[in-house]
Amino acid sequence: MAFFKKRERAEPEQIPKENDCEDLLISTYLGRNNITREMAEEIPAIQGNLDLIVKTAANVPIRLYKKNGKRVEEIENDHRVSLLNEDTGDTLDAKEMKQAMFRDYFLGKGGYCYVNRDGLEIRSLHYVDQKNVGTAKDPDVIFKKYVILVQGKSYFPEDFIKLLRNTTDGAKGHSIIETNKTLISIMYNNMKYEETLVKTGGNKKGFIKSPRSLTQAALDSIKAAFKKLYQNNTENVVVLNNGLEFQESSNTSVEMQLNENKQTNSNECCKMLGIPSTMLSGGGNEEDDKKFIKYCVTNLLDEFMTAINKVLLLESEKGQYFFAPDMYELTKGDIDKRYNAYKTATDSGWLQVDEVRERENMEPLGMNMIKLGLQDVLYDPKTQMLYVPNTNQMHKLGEGGNGEGESK
């Protein structure tokens, strides 16, 4: 009877159980991912640029100078110079400490270094990872005050050397991840998208056409088979039964322009950090080197010098003493450039021969003479005596006289 007509069982609702992970770049535009420091450090362009900046800046020695009227003299035997260049008194040496601070400057809220004092004397310097540093600020937005918190203990701001990027309160800075979220997110997802293509063995994406509806069990079986197909370390064969047909999808614009996107993103990363793009590929020329040192390394070191002058100098020393980087080390690797600089300095009288030999770690010759011109007049600045080899005569500045071997 019609009342007892057999009822057909409805097919189970086909609910996708897995999210497709192949369109990571599209998800960047639909919903921005939260990029962490670890993610940013995985990007080769960022890691390579930061290595170049950080290691170059950390290798520059720091000197202490004193203003004496119009003259500036170097203070060589100060313990603070040794702490900044050699042994910090911590598990990290000076270069490792500076590299860690510079990385935190770019990738965290800032570089922090605790100054261990014994009265007025500085005993040691201790790098503190920025993730272990917190701040508690006074609500007054004009007369700003704050304390630094580390493992539940509070410290005064002057207890730390603070290297902060784009800070607005003097307590913490803003990393490149905060200020360039979209670019770094695109670069990271571009890399993950490429990883997905590699994991799938380069097999084309596509879809299955069927002349009739499939059960959930059949769908699950097909999904499992294609999942194995797209894995490099498994069999690459799928058998399609019952009239099923695989329809290959065309390449997306992202796939076709993957290499172009990578190059463009790498160039944008160089702009973000102020580095000529040719520096990263190894094709930089002398002009690129100058731009890198002037606009990138020098700016970072200037900020670092301001930070250490504020904390490491006594109040009675400020205005008279100052720390400064010895940029000579940046040209030490290029012997032709270095020797041409020495020639210019000695010809113009800025350096003496023994000063040049001292910079090259060579034994001095005891020649305290400065060439004044025509390569035939020698001047001793200590005795103010002039010697003219052509006439074999000595002259003292400001005096006159006659006689062989004397001024006249």
Image (cartoon, rainbow, N blue to C red):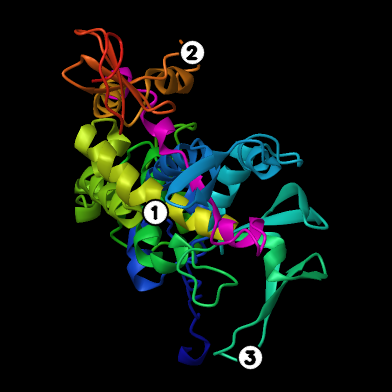
Mark 2 and mark 1 residues within 8 Å of each other at the beta carbon: no
Point 63% across, 91% down: residue:
139
Q: Is residue 399 visible?
A: yes
261 versus 18 height, above or below: above
Q: Nearer the viewer, residue 142 or 14?
A: 142
342 versus 104 height, above or below: above
Point 54% across, 77% down: residue:
169
Q: The disc labelled 2 sits on which kind of residue? A: Met
Q: Nearer the viewer, residue 116 or 7?
A: 116
157 versus 374 height, above or below: below
SS state under label 3: loop
**Which disc, if any, is residue 362?**
2
State the CA–CA distance, disc 3 to disc 2: 58 Å
Q: Is residue 236 visible?
A: no
Callout 3: 10 Å neighbours few (<14), some, many (20+)? few
Q: The disc labelled 3 sits on which kind of residue? A: Pro
Question: Which one is closest to the eye, mark 2 or mark 1?
Answer: 2
SS state under label 1: helix
SS state under label 2: loop
- Residue 119 location, quadrant: bottom right
- Image position, residue 149 (x, y; %): 75, 70
Tell me: 89 left or right of 137: right
Callout 2: 10 Å neighbours few (<14), some, many (20+)? few
Mark 1 sits on what residue?
299
Mark 3 sits on what residue?
139
**Which disc, if any, is residue 105?**
none
Q: Which residues are magenta?
A: 309-338
Is tag 1's residue or tag 3's residue first in the polypeptide sequence? Answer: 3
396 versus 362 height, above or below: below
Residue 29 within the segment the image draws in magenta:
no
